[in-house]
Image (spheres, coloured by chain):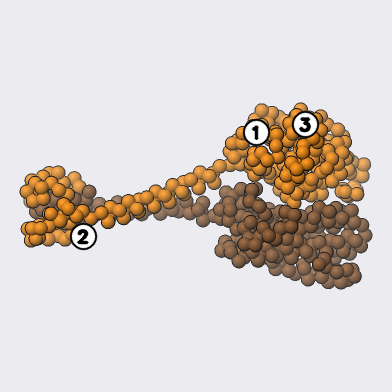
Amino acid sequence: MSSESVVADEIEAPADAAVNRRVSRRWLALLGVLLAVAAAYTGGYLTPALRAPGDHSPEAGFARDMSTHHAQAVDMAMMAYPKATLPEVRILAADIAMTQENQIGVMHTWLLNWHDSVNSLDPPMSWMPDGPEALHDGLMPGMATPQEMDKLRNATGKDVDILFCQLMLRHHLGGIHMVDGVLAVSHNQQVRDLATAMKTGQSGEVEVMHHLLDQLGAKPLS
Amino acid sequence: MSISTPQPGGNRRPSVVAKPAAGAKPRADKSTGAKPTAGKTGKPGGSRPPIKPIKANTNRDWFPVALWTLVAVIALGIVGYGGWQVYQNGLSWQDRAAKIDGLVNYRKTEPDVTKPAQHAWGPLTYKQSPPVAGTHNYNWQNCMGDVYDAPIANEHAVHSMEHGAVWITYRPDLPKDQVEALAKKVRGNPYMLMSPYPGLDKPISVQTWGYQLKVDKASDKRIDEFIKALRQNASVEPGASCSQGITATGTTPHDLGKDQPGGTNQMGG
């Protein structure tokens, strides 16, 4: 449109055309600025929605799957807490239960804030490259089978201490594996921070549980 | 930036507006109405080679047109995708649930029943079968992906649903392979539990606090849609746990802890 009219003007009178061209450039510049502002506003409005990890992102997958993983740890810890014989085991169980329950809440809030679904039909671990292969009987790495959970539920005395340390040690190693999976791919700082904290905390507890098992005269599960 | 050349003819309008008046006469002379697209420089038209108008006629430069069309299409695509994303993300779990064909929303039809409820000991009666809400036992049924092979007490299961669990029930005559298909949706998943339910009017019934879906087959996709939309989301006690619940079966409620004031609520003994 404008180039057409510029040419038309220019044919009539060169000087007149020069003025009109300047005027039309001003309008164009103004239009450009308005468009840029509109684009920036729209972009700014959409950016949080578009930048938030999506429903199938590794971050969302991690948040969901680690919540499931954590929930079992809380379950185990709540079983061991009232009946373990060693105070060190009871304290460790209480610590794990409260820490991981809190972290579940944090991850749940991520999903809500990202407008991602709390539940997914994706198979567990499908956000990790070798994830689905790491499942056994639908359970994520380190997770106890229903039979093992029953065993801990019904255990008494020193067996509680041993079984808890054995199951939780393996559980933590599986959890650390998942943490490594998300750290390898995610640039989301919130996710990286919590994942790193999980790794540090659980690695420390792995050492503690090795010592406790030694003390109890038992060995980690193979 | 200022307009330096004064114009006697008062022709200082924006060029877009000026077009018809200013361009009518000379355009007829020089370019015979064709769209001149080659006005690249500010030089007077007279100094150009005579061949130019022909060039403009026959060899229209489509490149800018194609370029801007492409830009427009990409821009529309981005805006459209963004808008679609925002719409999708804006869908609440209630919206998603409402899209499930055959879902019964008791929160609408029975708002009194589905309000956060009280606790009670002993057997209770429910209007719906299986129940979807209401007063329930102090103890909840363990719902850490528990697959129960025998019927459980409504009074505990209702409490689990209050905590956000999806309870899958099936008629005991459901074929084994379908029972296993259902169990796969449950095992290892917190906020899920499953048990047989004698006397069920349909082969399978899936429920959570205030919502129910009855289907004929375990392969019905609506079961997954139900779980995806409602598990945890429909909790009336967000954050409440599924562990530390009753793990025993049997339809008579286990009044665990009732007779041990001050004692620990020790489960599963």
Camera-side mark, 3 or 1: 3
Q: How many labels were placed on the picture? A: 3
Camera-side mark, 1 or 2: 1
Q: Earlier in the sequence, mark 3 or mark 2?
A: 2
Q: Chain of mark 2?
A: B
Q: Chain of mark 1?
A: B
| Residue A88 picture quarter | bottom right
Query: How far is mark 1 from mark 2, CA to CA?
Result: 67 Å
**SS assignment at label 3:** loop
Q: Amino acid at mark 1?
A: Leu
Q: Colour of chain B?
A: orange
The percent position of residue A81, horizontal first and vertical second, equals 84, 57
Q: Residue at x 75, y 51 (%)?
A: B188
Disc 3 to disc 1: CB gap under 8 Å? no
Dot 3 alpha-carbon crowd within 10 angstroms: few under 14, some 14 to 19, many 20 or more: some
**SS assignment at label 2:** loop
Q: Is residue B88 left or right of residue B164?
A: left
Dot 2 alpha-carbon crowd within 10 angstroms: few under 14, some 14 to 19, many 20 or more: few
The percent position of residue A157, horizontal first and vertical second, equals 93, 60
The percent position of residue A29, horizontal first and vertical second, equals 27, 55
Same chain for the residues at labels 3 and 1, yes or no? yes
Q: Residue at x 63, y 51 (%)?
A: A122
Same chain for the residues at labels 3 and 2, yes or no? yes
Query: How far is mark 3 from mark 1, CA to CA?
Result: 17 Å
Q: Which residue is mark 1?
A: B103
A85 or B52, which is in the foreground? B52
| Tag of residue B200 | 3
| Tag of residue B1 | 2
Q: Chain of mark 3?
A: B
